[in-house]
Image (cartoon, rainbow, N blue to C red):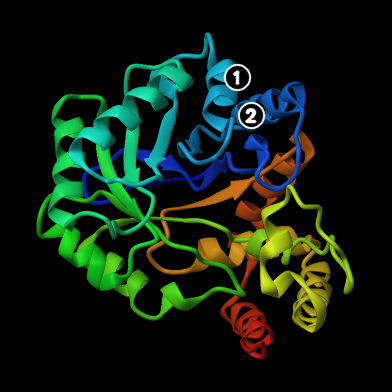
Amino acid sequence: MEYRQLGHDGPHITRITFGAWPIGGGMGAVDGATAVATIHRALDIGITAIDTAEAYRTSEAVIGRALAGRPRDELFLATKISAEPFTRERIEAALANSLRALGTDYVDLYQLHRYPSDVPLEEAIAGLAEVQRSGRARYVGVSNFTTDQLAAARRLHPIQSVQPRLSLFDAEATRDLLPYCAAENVGVVAHSPLAKGLLTGKYRPGHVFPADDERSGFPRFRGEALARYVAAADELAALAQTKGASLVQLAIAWTLSQPGVTSCIVGAKTPEQVEEHVGAIALRQRLTGEDLERITAIAARLP
């Protein structure tokens, strides 16, 4: 397992972070035993960073059950406040709820899930600062912030990391956010490297997602849009095969290859998926500059 330091003075965390949205049921039901077994497999093969959020349905409680009895100092736990209001009082209460569900008295990273629209940024950042001073959060960060929003937050309080959406099909962060973070030594924990499943090769044109799956409401997962993404994914899968790898591994490896990325959050529903994800680390080391250019060019043809 590879590690990278989170920000200029943070801990070294695994290059792959276990993402808990799927085990909470956000992408279809996952039974409790399978969810716990998936977390255990991630830990057993060396993934010690876990990311969740209060909005990830039952995921925090599932993680708490899975981690019972495990040495706390060997883990890096990150969670987020997701729901408004992002006041200091609400941040305090949300973290208290998360700690109870996770079965711990502190998290390693506590984050705003998105830019606050209901209160001034100063109020939300003050809430993060308070929970950090109390010791219930070792570090604080933000998720889904633009470069300007991140810079504004950093003027108010040290922000250890940012979580941008980043995949071959969602590469906007490479334009300015990643260069900014590299220059300022802000940690980057990228999420959604598989583009919510578009980069898994599992889906074909015409696929219909069940109502309990968030993707059922996303335009890119329907009709002609889905067909275009599937065609690009098939081309990328063929390229991956020449490297002795899967499309999933290629997508994760590309994300890990982007300058400034500390770790990549990858969600999993089964132990087998976790095992596949880890193979992306070795693949990243084998990708040449020419490979990365070919991969990027395929994805760039999409609107």
Task: Name which quarter of the figure residue 229 lies in.
Answer: bottom right
Compared across the picture, whether 85 is left or right of 257 comes to left
Residue 160 at x, y = what percent?
Answer: 25, 49
Compared across the picture, whether 256 is left or right of 259 comes to right
Q: Amino acid at mark 2?
A: Ile
Picture residue at 31% right of the left edge, 59% below the top: 115
Residue 89 at x, y = what percent?
Answer: 21, 33
Is residue 13 placed above or below 94 in the rendered structure? below
Q: Nearer the viewer, residue 68 or 16?
A: 68
Quarter of the image with the C terminus in it: bottom right
Compared across the picture, whether 175 is left or right of 225 comes to left
Quarter of the image with the N terminus in it: top right
Q: Nearer the viewer, residue 226 or 281?
A: 226
The residue tagged 2 is: 39
Q: Are marks 2 and 1 in contact (CB under 8 Å)?
A: yes
Q: Nearer the viewer, residue 150 or 174?
A: 150
The residue tagged 1 is: 66
